[in-house]
């Protein structure tokens, strides 16, 4: 049981949001209730999005009052949102119980990246609604091209805080969230237990299949190996960017800890255990990783295991990196030619466009409360557009009819 506690020691209450079905059953028995009460609460929390015990009308009044005295439902508090005028992406800003803030990105149904496109049971484009969720406040991995990395690591999110992002997006849109991408702020495999607990609850309690979830990692091999050992069906995306240790280390310092040979071995084991094709994400930077020898190495690497390559446009974050490599990175003018070269080598390549770039919600652009955020004036201010500034999930949805033609997009990794 995660056991998040709210309040002072004298009035400490247990946070039930983020508990699994079994944990809720156990919790209810510790209160002297029958275990099936845990199943009821589980349905109310995740299938129906209840935000108060008082609204759980099929639970006896005395039990509800007991719950109100001993427990809370605490996820994330919506602070504001920025809808993209360009493509319909919405960036949500959430507050956490300790005053920290995180962001999530709702990717519109019309033109988003579809990790399930090759599956018969995949949601159709009209039905699909993807949320890119954060898993940490900040991130310790400091990739040169990423705004989140400039924040440093603050803390891991709880399962309840991860799930809370999805509950709020579902409420705000009035629609089912069909796809989850763990690609927001943070390295999800550094918060393995809570991310996987949240994924399990989303699958079991919120009707989001594991095959409709994608987890993007910078290459934290210990986590990839654990996914393999546990035969996790969540799709694996690896933020690759270079198949040269020297180049990749400059872009992604995590390469020092897990060199490419180790990464490839972990990916091989994941594929052997799950038979789920891996996605590699690549941004091409001018004169950094777009030279002929870079592309030759890249082709060799991605061919080693059944995979596809997502080519992601570079979203400038110079305002976060006033000096060093991050400040000098420019999009490669050779990107189109490289994509053709990869395809000629029989590699499946998807070229993604830049959903949310105008609101700093695109790949690599998520960051809150970073010291240099306002420099350069590139980031629009958050403004409150949602009908609720609290966790009132019973307010009518705002966004449900606001469909726009948009682009594909994920965020940080
Ligand atoms: S790209 Fe991902 S792993 Fe790298 S710093 Fe950003 S959030 Fe962390």
Image: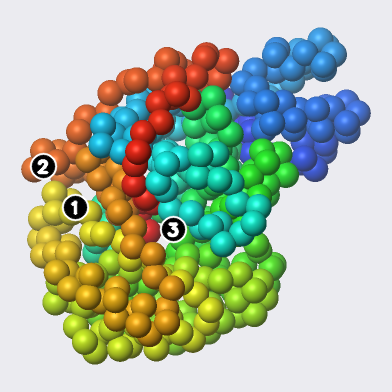
Position above or below: 65 against 137: above
Q: Which residue is mark 3?
A: 187
Specify which label sits upstream in the sequence, 1 or 2: 1
Instruction: Name the side, left or right, on which 2 lies relative to 99.
Output: right
Q: How many numbered badges does the structure rendering display?
A: 3
Is 238 rendered above or below residue 318? below
Q: First in sequence: mark 3 or mark 1?
A: 3
Q: Secondary structure at mark 1?
A: loop
Q: Residue at x 42, y 78 (%)?
A: 347
> With 107 as the anchor, is 294 left or right in this view?
left
Q: CA distance from mark 2 to mark 3?
A: 25 Å
Contact check, label 2 and label 3, Cβ < 8 Å: no
Binning the other alpha carbons within 10 Å of mark 1 as few (below 14), some (14 to 19) or many (20 upward) gives many
Helix, strand or loop at disc 3? loop
Residue sitting at x 23%, y 59%: 314
Quadrant in the picture for residue 56 = top right
Q: Which mark is residue 375?
A: 2
Query: Among all residues in the image, which is located at the extreme right?
Result: 34
Q: Give the answer, above or below, for where 304 lies relative to 275.
A: below
Q: Is residue 190 among what the camera can see?
A: no
Q: Residue at x 56, y 71 (%)?
A: 277
Dot 3: within a 10 Å radius of its alpha carbon, few (fewer than 14), some, or many (20 or more) residues? many
Query: How far apart in space, not on screen, are marks 1 and 2 (Cα)?
Result: 10 Å
Residue at image mark 1:
317
The foreground one among 7 and 148 is 148
Q: Nearer the viewer, mark 3 or mark 1?
A: 1
Q: Residue 29: horizontal and vertical position, in percent? A: 86, 32
Q: N-terminal of the two: label 2 or label 3?
A: 3
Quadrant that contains the N terminus: top right
């Amino acid at each position: 049981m995660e056991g998040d506690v709210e309040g002072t020691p004298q009035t400490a209450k247990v946070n039930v949001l983020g508990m699994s079905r079994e944990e809720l059953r156990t919790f209810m028995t510790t209160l002297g209730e029958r275990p099936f009460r845990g199943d009821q609460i589980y349905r109310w929390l995740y299938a129906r999005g209840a935000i108060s015990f008082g609204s759980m009308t099929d639970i006896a009044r005395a039990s509800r009052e007991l719950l109100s005295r001993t427990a809370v439902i605490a996820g994330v508090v919506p602070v504001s949102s920025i809808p993209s005028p360009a493509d319909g992406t919405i960036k949500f800003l959430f507050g956490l119980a300790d005053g920290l803030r995180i962001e999530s990105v709702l990717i519109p149904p019309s033109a988003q990246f579809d990790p399930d496109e090759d599956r018969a049971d995949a949601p159709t484009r009209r039905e699909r609604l993807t949320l890119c969720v954060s898993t940490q406040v900040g991130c310790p991995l400091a990739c040169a091209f990423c705004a989140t990395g400039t924040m440093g690591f603050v803390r891991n999110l709880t399962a309840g805080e991860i799930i809370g992002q999805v509950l709020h997006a579902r409420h705000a849109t009035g629609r089912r969230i069909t796809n989850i991408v763990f690609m927001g702020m943070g390295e999800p495999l550094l918060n393995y237990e809570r991310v996987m607990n949240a994924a399990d609850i989303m699958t079991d309690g919120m009707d989001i299949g594991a095959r409709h979830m994608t987890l993007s990692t910078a290459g934290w091999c210990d986590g990839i190996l654990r996914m393999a050992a546990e035969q996790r069906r969540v799709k694996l995306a690896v933020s690759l960017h270079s198949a040269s240790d020297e180049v990749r280390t400059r872009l992604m310092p995590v390469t020092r800890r897990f060199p490419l040979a180790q990464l490839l071995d972990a990916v091989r084991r994941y594929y052997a255990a799950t038979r789920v094709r891996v996605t590699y994400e690549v941004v091409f930077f001018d004169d950094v990783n777009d030279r002929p020898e870079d592309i030759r190495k890249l082709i060799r690497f991605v061919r080693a295991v059944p995979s596809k390559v997502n080519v992601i446009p570079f979203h400038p974050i110079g305002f976060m990196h006033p000096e060093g490599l991050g400040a000098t990175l420019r999009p490669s003018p050779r990107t189109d030619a490289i994509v053709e070269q990869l395809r000629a080598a029989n590699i499946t390549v998807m070229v993604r466009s830049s959903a949310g770039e105008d609101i700093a919600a695109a790949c690599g652009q998520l960051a809150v409360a970073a010291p240099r955020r306002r420099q350069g004036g590139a980031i629009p201010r958050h403004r409150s557009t949602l009908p609720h500034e609290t966790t009132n999930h019973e307010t009518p949805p705002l966004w449900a009819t606001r469909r726009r033609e948009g682009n594909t997009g994920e965020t940080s990794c």
